[in-house]
Amino acid sequence: MGALGDIVQAMGSAAAIRAHHPGATIVLLTTRPYAGLMRQAPYFDDVWIDERPRDPVGLWRLARRLRGGYFDRVYDLSTRQRSALYFRLMRRPLWSHAGPEWSGIVRGASHRQPDTRERGRMHTLDREADQLRWAGIPGPIPPPDMSWAATDISRFALPPGYVLLMPGAAPHRPEKRWPLAHFIELARRIVAAGVVPVLVGGAAERELGAAIAAAVPEARDLTGETEFGDILALGRGARRAIGNDTGPMHLAVVAGAPATVLYSAASDPALTAPRGPDVMILRRDDLADLAVDEVAATLGLPA
């Protein structure tokens, strides 16, 4: 029920839950942007879309559907205020205490993970592993795997050893973006070293991709042209992926791409950064202060 990075990082927990309940019917509740991707996952028997209603009628309909599923257990990997609301909605009837077993932090949960200060300092993967331990899944929890979603990207006809650049981030979080001029200069240096920079992002990043491609014609601009599975496949073949703290970077890392992730003061990599065998985190309170030289050094390209 969170952003793309949350979805990616939850896949290890999803695999562990599936293994712990091999004969169960498992339903995932997620939001519309990720439903198609999650329907490909081997961990779920069904995927329900949460339209996130706020009006009384919408909430009543959602409560009726959730209770009508007659679930035996819920794993709340979101642990947000909204999922705490769903804990109350799933009681049958609403004023009773009858409802499914619940793994999460909400008060009254049958398998409650203590909501402590220590939990608040845990990385997402460690926090979920601890939550599952409280629910009787001892671990170890496997790392996230999304190989099942990778697509055939031969249509892009990319050269070997390209570098993925992801200049975007959430539109409402401009402070999480390394300056466009820095990405342009980095792309120029990549080209000067004889390597092709490949620009990736959603439809909202098309303007950024076009600006970089206009300044560096040798770059391949794929912004707005890729699905989630394409980014996974692109990550497999990349020499390195460089980008802001954004969901597609999580996809590239889980696919195996060496990565350099750029963080500002807007988020804490100790809590949310993608994990992999070769992931470098570069952080400045203001990303405008992060020099191109420092980012370019992580590529290992000739000067």
Image (cartoon, rainbow, N blue to C red):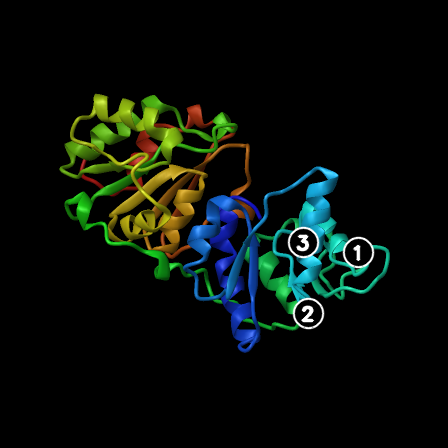
Q: Position of residue 20 (x, y in %)?
A: 56, 75
Q: As shown in the figure, which amino acid type bears the numbered disc 2?
A: Asp
Residues at badges 2 and 1 in contact (C-beta under 8 Å)? no
Q: Position of residue 18 (x, y in %)?
A: 52, 70
Residue at 77% from the left image edge and 53% from the top image edge: 88
Q: Residue furthest bottom?
A: 23
Secondary structure found at label 3: helix
Q: Earlier in the sequence, mark 2 or mark 1?
A: 2
Q: CA distance from mark 1 to mark 3?
A: 15 Å
Quarter of the picture containing the C terminus is top left
Q: Position of residue 210 (x, y in %)?
A: 27, 25
Q: As shown in the figure, which amino acid type bears the numbered disc 3?
A: Arg
Q: How many marks?
A: 3
Q: Is residue 150 above or below residue 80?
A: below
Secondary structure found at label 1: loop
Question: Mark 1 packing: few (<14 Cα in 10 Å), some, or many (20+)?
Answer: few
- Which numbered marker is on residue 72? 2
Q: Earlier in the sequence, mark 1 or mark 3?
A: 1
| Residue placed under numbered mark 3 in the picture | 119
Q: Position of residue 21 (x, y in %)?
A: 57, 75
- Which numbered marker is on residue 107? 1
Q: As shown in the figure, which amino acid type bears the numbered disc 1?
A: Arg
Q: Is residue 207 visible?
A: yes
- Which numbered marker is on residue 229? none
Q: CA distance from mark 3 to mark 2?
A: 26 Å
Question: Which is nearer the eye, 160 or 288?
Answer: 160
Q: Earlier in the sequence, mark 3 or mark 2?
A: 2
Mark 2 or 1, closer to the camera: 2
Question: Mark 3 packing: few (<14 Cα in 10 Å), some, or many (20+)?
Answer: some
Residue at 72% from the left image edge and 66% from the top image edge: 100
Give the left or right position of residue 32, taking residue 60 as reference: left
Residue at 80% from the left image edge and 59% from the top image edge: 108
